[in-house]
Amino acid sequence: MAYLLNLKTFIDKRGNLTVIEKVVPFDIKRIFYIYGVDDSIRGGHRHVKTIQAAICIKGTCTIFNNDNEEKNEFVLDSPDKCLILEPKDWHQMHSFSEDAILMVLASEYFEQNDYIYEKYND
């Protein structure tokens, strides 16, 4: 099941510094970010092998998750919140704020055969 991590953040009068080091449960092979999203729903898949860490580094978005046992929604509204998505986590991203930037760290390089688009049976 997907779960949230709180990323270590250092705050002082100069600003905030959030660190992503030794906290995600995989070696990072790919980084991408999603922004400029209208009212569309993104995602709509799970993976064979890839683990992902999703961080809304600006604005907010919501991620719906179904691991075939539980269904949950996670609101990412702070750059120190990190949602870990396991390969079995079928997910959709929606309700992006106008200024949202969703950064995703992935355990694998892009491979089309790693994507499973079919939803779990209800």
Image: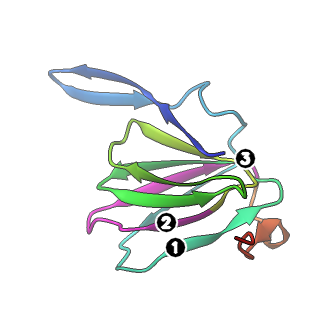
- Which circle's residue, 1 or 2, is located before the other in the chain? 1
Q: x and y percent of residue 24 in the render?
A: 62, 33
Residue drawn where x is 58% and y is 70% of the image: 43
Q: Nearer the viewer, mark 3 or mark 1?
A: 1
SS for dot 1: strand
Disc 2: which residue: 93
Please tell me which residue lies in front, 116 or 53. 116
Label 3, label 1: how far apart the Cα atoms are: 19 Å
Disc 1: which residue: 42
Question: Marks 1 and 3: in contact by CB < 8 Å?
Answer: no
Q: Is residue 13 left or right of residue 88?
A: left
Residue drawn where x is 68% and y is 42% of the image: 28
Which residue is outermost to the front? Answer: 122
Disc 2: CA contacts within 10 A as few (<14), some (14-19) or many (>=20): some
SS for dot 3: loop
- Which circle's residue, 2 or 3, is located before the other in the chain? 2
Q: x and y percent of residue 2 in the render?
A: 61, 46
Question: Marks 2 and 1: in contact by CB < 8 Å?
Answer: yes
- Is residue 32 located in the magenta-colored stretch of the structure? no
Disc 1: CA contacts within 10 A as few (<14), some (14-19) or many (>=20): some
Label 1, label 2: how far apart the Cα atoms are: 5 Å
Residue drawn where x is 72% and y is 47% of the image: 107
> Which amino acid, by three-letter code, is at mark 3?
Ser
The stretch of residues the image draws in magenta is 91-108
Label 2, label 3: how far apart the Cα atoms are: 19 Å
Q: x and y percent of residue 121 in the render?
A: 75, 72
Disc 3: which residue: 107
- Which circle's residue, 3 or 1, is located before the other in the chain? 1
> Which amino acid, by three-letter code, is at mark 2?
Met
The answer to whether 79 is drawn above or below residue 110 in the figure is above
> Which amino acid, by three-letter code, is at mark 1?
Arg
Colour mode? rainbow
